[in-house]
């Protein structure tokens, strides 16, 4: 539901303002949840001990939401969702293989490569008219 909702918002107010509104509302909800149920922000200072690349999640999320705002118009909700899942799982297999970002290494196996190929085929079947 998020993709078509954000797409309509983007058509109404513009792509980047819509992405900003989406993130602002999400931020407000998450701050409220953190304050009410998560113990607040007492450990926030610990972020200074992290490497810079562990802070890229917000940038990646903004890029994703903005991309979805644009691509759902042509691919549809199913196409965007299929491409997202295939892309995330493919990147996860690569990250597992490299053992980066604190992940244990997992090799490329025939099963994993077949899984990626099947994901790609699935995306093609979903987005094809």
Image (spheres, grey):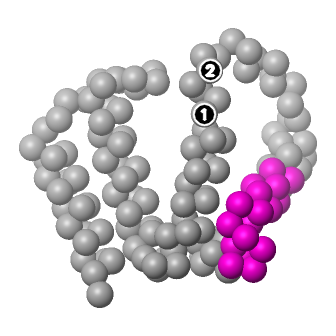
Q: Residue 105: image x %, image y %?
A: 29, 24
Depth check, front residue: 35 or 88: 88
Residue 61 location, x and y as percent?
Answer: 61, 48
Residue highlighted by disc 2: 52
Does residue 125 sit above or below 105 in this rendering?
A: below
Q: To which residue does mark 1 refer? A: 56
Residue at the extreme top of the image, as rendered? 49
Q: Is residue 35 above or below residue 16?
A: above
In the displayed structure image, the side of residue 60 where residue 58 appears, left or right = right
Image quarter (top left, top right, bottom left or bottom right) of the C terminus? bottom left
**Dot 2: few (<14), some (14–19), or many (≥20) neighbours within 10 Å?**
few
Q: Residue at x 82, y 18 (%)?
A: 45
Give the camera-side residue of 111 and 13: 13
The magenta stretch spans residue 51? no
Residue 27 seen: yes
Magenta-highlighted residues:
9-28
Residue 50, given in percent of the width and then of the height, sits at: 64, 17
The image shows residue 115, relative to residue 123, as above or below, that is above
Helix, strand, or loop for circle 2?
helix
- For residue 20: magenta? yes
Mark 1 Cα-neighbour bin, 10 Å: few <14, some 14–19, many ≥20: few
């Amino acid at each position: 539901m998020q993709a078509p909702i954000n797409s309509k918002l983007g058509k109404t107010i513009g792509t980047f303002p819509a992405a900003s509104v989406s993130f602002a509302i999400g931020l407000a909800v998450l701050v409220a949840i953190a304050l009410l149920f998560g113990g607040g922000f007492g450990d926030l200072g610990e972020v200074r001990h992290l490497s810079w690349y562990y802070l890229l999640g917000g940038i990646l999320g903004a890029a994703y939401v903005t991309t979805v705002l644009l691509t759902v118009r042509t691919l549809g909700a199913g196409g965007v969702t299929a491409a997202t899942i295939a892309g995330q799982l493919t990147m996860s297999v690569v990250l597992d293989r490299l053992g980066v970002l604190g992940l244990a290494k997992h090799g490329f196996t025939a099963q994993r490569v077949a899984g990626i190929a099947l994901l790609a085929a699935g995306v093609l079947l979903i987005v094809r008219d």
